[in-house]
Amino acid sequence: MSLLSVDRVTRRFGSLVAVNNVSMTVEPGELRAVIGPNGAGKTTFFNLISGFLQPTSGRILFDGQDITALLPARRVWRGIARTFQITEVFPELSVHENLRIAVEVAAGYRLRPWISRTARGEIEAEVRGIVEMGGLGAVQSRVVGELSHGDQRACEIMMALALKPRLLLLDEPTAGMGEQETYNTTQLIRRLHRDQKLSIVLIEHDMRVIFHLAERITVLTEGAVLAEGTPPEIAANAAVQAAYLGQAA
Amino acid sequence: MPRIDRRAADALIWLLLVAVPFWLPLVGSYVELGTHVVVYALAAMALNFLLGYTGVLSFGHAAYFGLGAYGAAMSIKYLYPSTPLGIVVGVVTGMVAAGIIGLLIVRLRGVYFAMCTIAFGQVFYFIAFQWRSATGGDDGVSAWHRVPLDLGFANLDIHGSARAFYYFVLAVFAVCVGAMAFLLRSPFGRTLVAIRENERRARFLGIPVDRHIWMSWVISCFFVSVAGALFALMNNFVDPRALRWDQSGNFVIMAVLGGMRSFWGPLIGAAIFLVLQDYISSHTENWMSFIGLFFVLIVLFFPRGVLGLVRRKAT
């Protein structure tokens, strides 16, 4: 069974059709890239999957169950985590505190007015593991708002990961990053996918990142699916070249 | 700030509070002013639970403060002359109202939320003002007084002795403040800070934001109605001014003045506000202008409040 299946979803803003009758399925363990020119509706599409927006029509199934009407928090509980195009973290808290909140919420402690010593130890160990995995050890006690752009992005990705999602949505994870940061982030995403068998959907503009990571690519233009296939197929697709790659060159 | 410093600061504050009846008269003041400060500090700290730690501004906390006060006063006057019962009735009244109104406004944000809290607050003000037969209208609820506490083994004369009443208020304050500190240090408390820091991120971590804001609102209103009940007991009287909008404004001023990102900030703010009021109002009727000026200067130059300034100097 597909992990995520988006079924003929449309979203209108007034007379603008941002996402037009889009269908897509993501299999467990798949790494999918969504690409397309600016204004193609990629982020809106993400917002529909994560519950930030409601579709005008169509259905979204996650793990076989209809989640179309669920609030964002409930989708997170089902196992969908996301990052944003513009980094969303808790800027005045340290990296460690940011991640601890994510770990505690994921552990189901969000309503606990107290926490036992053992549970605190377990959470601490988990946070340490995530800090290490994200390569944030050197900055973990620093306030996130003061960190470099790349470290802030990494922190956000690790927060999403701390939720132990089954599907991770990454909205332009390498946007605004330098060479080295882009490389590190790409490696991180690859590791997560390979080691944890995590299903990932990512929006990306950097073609090297896409062709390096993605198993399948969905191309959106003007809110609709133009093509879908493996990276070589997409690279060879004449319509895609005309609409997207050709335009970029 | 290192942990050891914070503990030292906590200890110092508690020491000063416990010793108020001994040192306050020495500096030319009186114990009642100390009681006043502690009551308002509790209200301002309760407001700050919502404002400073959840990032939600309420301009209508006086309503729940006032309901606590009226609940206590009317319970003692009409129901049964017992101080603890009065407090319980006041707090339950305030909390029930806060719970219901919270449900109506919890989806609003920012200035819209603040405006609605004022509007609902004024509803309670006008009820107290107009409903003469029950609340005494503008004259308030008078001709009652707080009742000495019978502890079984001893009788605590909180009516006759200002000092005994101060310690009674301080004990209630300590329990409330301890509970707030405890909550803020818990996973639940951290979800509130998460909402303050970035609501969108909090939502997409799986925190049902509206529900948590509602809970924070009710908790905050709970403690502010405790303060209100104590306020009525302190004056042996309550009138509609206790729940008017300018009272809500005073709580906000105290919290911001002292520093809304620090736990003790509102206590400092309440102390400064009330001491200034006490001294300036004996010289001029326009004491509020001076407090306003002071407030504007603090907000302009030290947006983190007095305690924020002290902290920055320390580091």
Image (tube, coloured by chain):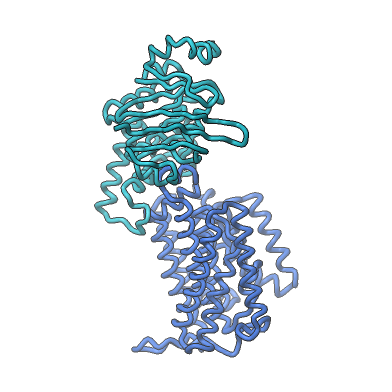
Chain colours: A cyan, B blue
Q: Taking B255 as reference, is B284 above or below it?
A: below
Q: Position of residue B224 (x, y in %)?
A: 52, 68
Q: In the drawing, does residue B290 fall left or right of residue B24?
A: right
Q: Which of the pair A16/B141 is nearer the observer?
A: A16
Q: Position of residue A15 (x, y in %)?
A: 62, 33
The residue lying at 46 percent from left, 36 percent from top is A58
Q: Which of the pair A25/B101 is nearer the observer?
A: A25
Residue A99 seen in this snapshot: yes
Q: Which of the pair B13/A224 is nearer the observer?
A: A224
Q: How many marks?
A: 0
Residue A147 seen in this snapshot: no
Q: Taking A244 as reference, is B149 above or below it?
A: below
The residue lying at 41 percent from left, 51 percent from top is B190
Residue B186 position by quadrant: bottom left
The residue lying at 66 percent from left, 50 percent from top is B300
Q: Position of residue A206 (x, y in %)?
A: 46, 19
Q: Position of residue B40 (x, y in %)?
A: 56, 69
